[in-house]
Amino acid sequence: MPESETKRSRRFSQKISLTAKMLMVTGVVGLAIWAISDKFETNTLQKIFTSNLNERLSQQARQQRTHFDRYVKGHHQTALIVTSARELHNHINRKNWARTGKPIIIHETTPKWLSTLSALRKFTQLRCVSLLDHAGKVREVYQGSSCRLPKTLLEPSSLLIATSHNQSFLTNLDGTPYLVTSESITNKTGHRLATLMIVSPIDEEFLLASQGAYAGETTVALLETDQDAILVSSNPDELAAGAKLEKLKERYLITGQGLFDYGASDLVVTFISFIPITEVEKLTSVVMVKARQARFITATVFILAFSLIMYWITTRISKLTNRIVEFSEHAEVTTTEQRGGDEIYVLEERFKLLMEEVRLEKDALQHQALHDPLTGLPNRLLLQNNMEQEIHRSQRTNKPFVLIVSDLNRFKEINDTLGHHIGDIVLQQSGERFIELLRKSDTTVRLGGDEFGILLPETNLSDATHIAEKISLAFDKPFLVEDHSLSIGISLGIVEYPIHGDNVQLLMQRADIAMYAAKRTNIGFNVYDPTNDQYSRDRLELMAQLREAIRLGTLELYYQPIVDLRSGKTTMAEALLRWNHEEYGYVSPTSFVPLAEQTGLIKPLTDWVINQALNDCARWIKAGFNLSVSVNLSAHSLHDIALADSLAAKLDEKELQPCHLQLELTEGSIMTDPVRAKEILTDLHDLGVSLSVDDFGTGYSSLGYLKQLPVNHIKIDRTFVTDMNKDESDAVIVQATIGLAHNLGLEVVAEGVENLQTLELLEQLGCDYLQGFYISHPVPYEEFVKWMNTSPWGNASADEKKILSDKKAGPA
Ligand code: C2E
Ligand code: CA
Ligand code: CA
């Protein structure tokens, strides 16, 4: 037996099989129906039989009564015939017949004068006949073997003779009912010579005789009406005299035909007919047996047919159940051992399980269709679906969204050298890193291989670059897989809807381009540039070179002095980045700093600048200049919550005071995320570094808002300053700004001072610090130190007044 079958039989052995159950039910129900219908039919038949028999009995009783009446009346007819017979007349007319004193002659055999009797026997049974003389005295008696003349009739009363005369008279004689009829025998003159009296005991024989040919078919009886008891019956064995009618009704169907109505009776009797109920039952049962046989055959056929159908159905159900059980076992559908219940129960349970399984399977398939089995992340299809939804949403809300496509940098090498097993773990860990970094509303998917896609709903490019930066940093941290510490790195391509494409395909394609560019140039992340592919390629190349320049330290910082107008001396120097490119010569920071911001390069760049600036600052302090250095930060730094700590560490390292460092932040960078900016600025302020709002006037921030920030200076943008000596509106703006800033307790730096008039104007307006070509161009460190030593704005010793006039005369 195969294993599954053993299991199954074990499982089903605990219960009766469905087939057996259904066959049993069929049998029991069939028998029950049969029994009920049998009972019902028997009752109905019995009722029908009873009523039929009643009908028959009453008909029969009428006939029997008629027979009885006729028979009774027949006695009188007989008397008439007998009395008219010649033999009787001859007998009476014999002399001496009427002589008195003679004893009564008793005939045991039929006397001659009764010779007519044999002819009459057909009508009447003359069992007892007496011959009376004219005086009414009994002379002769004939009595057959079954009859003795009652004593009363040996000397009959004249009343009895009279009442029985010319009719049949029923009467009770010596406690027994008798029929008495008498007829006179007269001579020619009409004189009565004698009287013939026929006496018949009304007994079983009488009743039987009265019924003639029908005798014995059913029992008839005379009922003593006032007693309600049997007087005499045609079958005394069954119905003895004295039996109470009430009792008899239990056993017999009884039909009574009422009282005798011809008045020739002094007995109150009723003629009744009986049929024993057993007869009804017998009759019923005869029919019933036949009907029952027929019914039994029908029922058996039905039950058999039904059983067959049941068997057929249930075996098929069983087969189906077994198949399903087999299937579910084969499909390893988890199930608890079925206890109790038949195949239908099992079928039901299995169905439930299978349905659940199918549902799970469907979900799993759906999940599988939209997810990557290795990382558990959604796949390309789901990303595309979500992007489509995002496009719709974006069209409604007018909010952009961003797609980032990423590719691991050294995945292939790791996969090839350490094996797929390690590669798989790297991919899984990559998925985890993404999930940790991103919001729940973002979608991270594995596009295939080591490519991942990230959908950032309701996000703009600026936010996206910060996210890309975070991702970049996270992937710069080594992956720990088994015993290996693996440096992987990641390249990210960024596109924004709708500016970089209005459909899923285009966005994916361009994100890919951006990503490959970032990879090629090793710049971490890169925003797709829609304007000019060539330009963007150049730009990317530039970024690659910038990365190299940072690594090699081939960048430079130039310093531009900032003069305190009160003392006329340089108290600060702004560090300005210079990149002397092999091919393009000096590249302006205005062109490569924003590029670095878009590609993950800004962080190393800023780090480099800060480091360099602090180094230089430390150097000039050592050289005896009490100058603070002013460093430009990009918006990116305002997302770096570790900035204050890392600056503190660096200041410590270079043995500088926080007041030696000043940080310049543009209005725009503060306003991108004012809440975050405020937090970071507060940290920086707490550290003790001084803070400047750069390019003031170009953004939308109000001084009112800036008041809430812990800043120390504002730097009025050079576009207002440079021409203020010629452009009155610029002068008005500068004047108002200085006034308001002072009211808020902020010091004002004017940048872009290119001539003396401007300088004087600013002096008049009460500006605090000056910066510009008029004082000095930004210059390399060495030159700056030289300038400090020689310029009157620098450290060159000159008396105050001379300084100012020298200053006014312009730099040498
Ligand atoms: P900024 O912070 O407003 O820097 C002042 C800019 O004005 C400098 O240009 C400087 O050379 C120029 N300048 C100074 N005096 C005058 C003047 O009298 N007339 C005119 N027309 N220009 C003057 P630069 O060095 O090309 O820097 C451009 C911008 O690049 C800076 O503007 C700053 O926003 C950014 N930048 C420079 N270095 C760095 C840096 O290290 N990090 C960051 N994040 N940004 C930097
Ligand atoms: Ca600046
Ligand atoms: Ca500026």
Image (cartoon, grey):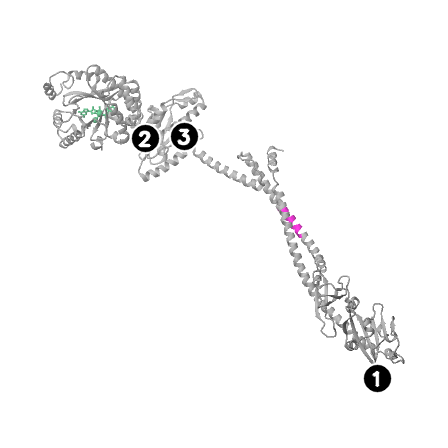
Say what amino acid the circle numbered 2 marks. Ala
Dot 2 or dot 1: first in sequence order is 1
Q: Which residue is mark 3?
A: 446
Quarter of the image for residue 735 reads top left
Q: Is residue 406 magenta?
A: no
* Secondary structure mostly seen in the magenta stretch: helix
Residue toward you, 578 or 174: 174
* Whether residue 301 is situated above or below residue 2 in the rendered picture: below
Dot 1 or dot 3: first in sequence order is 1
Where is residue 306 shown, x and y percent of the image?
A: 63, 48
Residue toward you, 775 or 15: 15
Q: Which residue is mark 1?
A: 188
- Crowd rating for badge 3 (residues with CA inside 10 Å; few <14, some 14–19, many 20+): many
Q: Which residue is mark 2?
A: 464
SS at mark 3 in the image: strand
- Crowd rating for badge 2 (residues with CA inside 10 Å; few <14, some 14–19, many 20+): many
Report whether 578 appears left or right of 735.
right
* Whether residue 244 is situated above or below residue 600 in the rendered picture: below
Cβ atoms at labels 2 and 1 below 8 Å apart = no
Task: State the residue lying farthest toward the top.
Answer: 623
Q: Which residues are magenta?
A: 298-309
